[in-house]
Amino acid sequence: MSKNRLEAFSDGVFAVIITIMVLDMKVPDGGTFTALLADLSIFLSYVLSFVYIALYWNNHHHLLHASEHVSGGILWANLHLLFWLSLAPFATAWMGKNFAPAPVALYGVVLLFAGIAYFVLTKSLVHSHGKDSALALSIGGDRKGMISVTVYAIAIPLAFVRPWIACCCYVLVAIMWLLPDPRIEKSIAN
């Protein structure tokens, strides 16, 4: 089965997610920078989520570019990922408006399950292409993916103690993923 439709559909969903997130940001009441500061948590939540969606889009693009074909199972694994990412606008808006333990923890739950879904998608693609394929060799043991899921799992309960520490964990994982995995880019070039 061709991967073109999966890529096109996924790109559309990523675009809609980002659009919904930006539409949730409202113009502040007042024409001063102080009025902007009142909505700083909303803006920072949006920035963090935009970075995450961009990271998923970028890595998803590289992952599919290194793939040769998709199967029905891969389509479902991809939809599983898109489901969790589609919850990002809601979690972002709630955390931005109410920087409190429950919204910060829910944001982490969305990140955790999106990370797990990406891991499942990756493993589905590797299984479909074979353990000796260029894709499998370029992904390796997916250490960054495992570290990400672990940090999210730690940050969720931390959100109930110190929401700022949980958010710092989310930021650290995003920083870790800012550059696409060079192993995948090398396999694409070869």
Image (cartoon, helix red, strand yellow):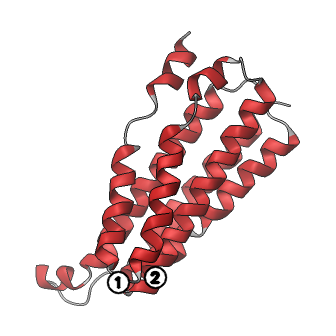
Label 1 crowd bin: few (<14), some (14–19), many (20+), radius 10 Å: some
Q: Is residue 167 left or right of residue 72?
A: left
**Secondary structure beneath label 2:** helix
* Residue depicted at x 66% and y 57%: 82
Using the image, tell me which numbered label, if any, was put on residue 103. Answer: 2
Residue 14 location (% of width, % of height): 57, 54
Q: Is residue 6 left or right of residue 60?
A: right
Measured along the vertical axis of the image, is residue 8 above or below residue 109?
Answer: above
Q: Residue furthest bottom?
A: 29
**Residue 85 visible in the snapshot:** no
**Secondary structure beneath label 1:** loop
Where does the C terminus fall, quadrant-wise? Answer: top right
**Residue 90 visible in the snapshot:** yes
Using the image, tell me which numbered label, if any, was put on residue 35. Answer: none
The reply to whether dot 2 and dot 1 touch (C-beta < 8 Å) is: yes
Label 2 crowd bin: few (<14), some (14–19), many (20+), radius 10 Å: many
Q: Is residue 71 left or right of residue 5?
A: right
* Residue depicted at x 39% and y 75%: 158
Using the image, tell me which numbered label, if any, was put on residue 99. Answer: 1
Measured along the vertical axis of the image, is residue 89 above or below residue 26?
Answer: above
* Residue depicted at x 71% and y 17%: 132
Q: In this orientation, which residue lies closer to the viewer: 30 or 79?
A: 79
* Residue depicted at x 72% and y 49%: 78
Residue type beneath disc 2: Pro
Query: Separation of disc 2 and disc 1 at Cα?
Result: 7 Å
